[in-house]
Image (tube, rainbow, N blue to C red):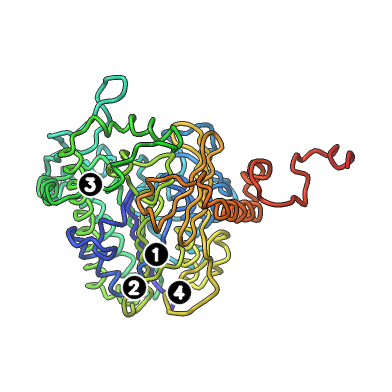
Amino acid sequence: MTANILFFLTDQHRTDTLGCYGNGLVSTQALDAIAEEGTTFRRFYTPTAICTPARASLLTGAAPFRHQLLANYERNVGYRDELADDQFTFSRALREADYNVGLIGKWHVGLHRTQHDYGFDGIPMHGWHNPVDHAEYVAYLDENDLPPYALTDEIRGTFPNGTPGNLLAARLDQPLEATFEYFLAERAIGLLRSYAAEHTAEGKPFFLATHFFGPHLPYNIPSHYFDMYDPEAITLPKSVAETFANKPPVQANYSAHWTFDTLSTATSKKLIAAYWGYVTMIDEQIGRIIAVAKELGVYDDSAVFFSADHGEFTGAHRLHDKGPAAYEDIYRVPGVVRLPGGHEPQVTDRFASLLDLTATILDVAGLDSAQAVDGTSLAPLVRGEQPPWRDDLVLEFHGHHFPYPQRMLITDRYKIVVNPESVNELYDLVDDPDELQNRYAHPELAQVRTGLLQRLYTQLRERGDNFYHWMASMYPVGEKDYDVSLSSFDDVQR
């Protein structure tokens, strides 16, 4: 029998907020329980740290440069705003394989199309954060005599132009049952019951994804969660010591945009405490869905996946949100895979990404995982096999608010980032895990730098990512076996 699949995706979720990733203070019982029967990937990455391109990569199994949906539509800087009509998506493949396919929650892939256009059941929801004016949510509140969405105790900084900054967190004057997260879990449970009944009666397999909009900022949560964690018990990230010396200037500009320096240390700690509370609230909703799956008898034999579209700074490097800064805080994300039946918990440092989840979904469904052209099924690793595996990852960024092309390569120890408009970056993730020192120009790392540039260039060229043309003339990446100017007269002159 083909396996059912339960898929959980959060938004802007740091790995260091989870028990299965070493946090002993934050309660994440539901997600930790998945990890106790699955594989936790400690070197798991998003292909790009921005919502829409990352989600489009998960949907398609294609890297952002390939599917070309490169920016959130709210901040689109001239890129395409929908996937190509002939773009492969795993959801359509599952439909063709006679799966029920559902997605409840955040979509954020394209401007006009919804998940319905790609074969998913579910409630269309546009936007980057909880759409609290959504007709179904408002009706849910009315039907259950629950109070409307209302905020107090807002936390904001001050923009460089002196006006109030973006909302970062607030106290939500609603009980848990009225929150958008609880509402999403209710709708996911409803669809789960329908799918499980059809599975039991007819053997029809299902894929059900629940995509929460949080813990993306602003952290607007009820008092129980807003006050759940003591700010005084929180230590700020070491990277708040960031000076932006020898870093791309855009990082300091982003810091000013996110108003970090206008906030007190106490406020920064409170923001992290609220963020943790948001994580716990979402974890509890995931737990509710899993409990119903167990009640219906469909959990044990289901594959279960958990990840996030990208991370969140929460003050690291004097930043909030995400943006043109290729730090681990926003590129490394949770990645937990439990195959049907579960197994003894295991942890791996093998490199993996959201693109691999696409391939794994196809594999679990008995389909050709090679359709996820830039991903590789994780199932062999989860089963304890030792297949040939990558020893680095290429990641990319294309802009948010404005075009900003970046490419980066991460190895066991190093990360190199190519920033064509300013300075490149090289970090030693062993000696400097907080990525405070850009060592790109350090003479003792010259050989390392050249080797990393060569590896990045070669992989970009092999993939067909035209960013490699910039590298061809700018860096010592070896002899060229092609016309680097793409001009026929160069061949004539030779």
- The quarter holding residue 68 reads top right
Three-letter amino acid code of the residue under disc 4: Leu
- Looking at the rendered image, the disc whose residue lies closer to the viewer, 2 or 3, is 3
Identify the residue under disc 3.
236
Q: Residue at x 58, y 66 (%)?
A: 370
- Residue 381 has which mark? 4
User: Could you classify mark 3 by the number of other residues whose Cα lies within 10 Å: few (under 14), some (14-19), or many (20 or more)?
Assistant: some
Tell us which disc is closer to us: 1 or 4: 4
Report the amino acid beneath label 1.
Phe
**Residue topped by disc 2:** 38
> Residue at 47% across / 71% down in the picture?
365
- Assign a secondary structure to mark 2: loop
Percent of width and height locating residue 453: 59, 51
Q: Residue at x 76, y 40 (%)?
A: 486
Label 4, residues with CA under 10 Å away: few <14, some 14-19, many ≥20: some
Percent from the top left, x then y, of residue 72? 44, 39
Q: Position of residue 411 (x, y in %)?
A: 49, 59
Assess disc 2: are there few (<14), some (14-19) or many (≥20) residues with their C-alpha within 10 Å of its C-alpha. many
| Secondary structure state at the residue bearing disc 3 | loop
First in sequence: mark 2 or mark 3? 2
Which quarter of the rendered picture does the C terminus lie within?
A: top right
In the rendered view, tell whether residue 142 sits above or below residue 368.
above
In contact (CB < 8 Å): disc 2 and disc 1: no
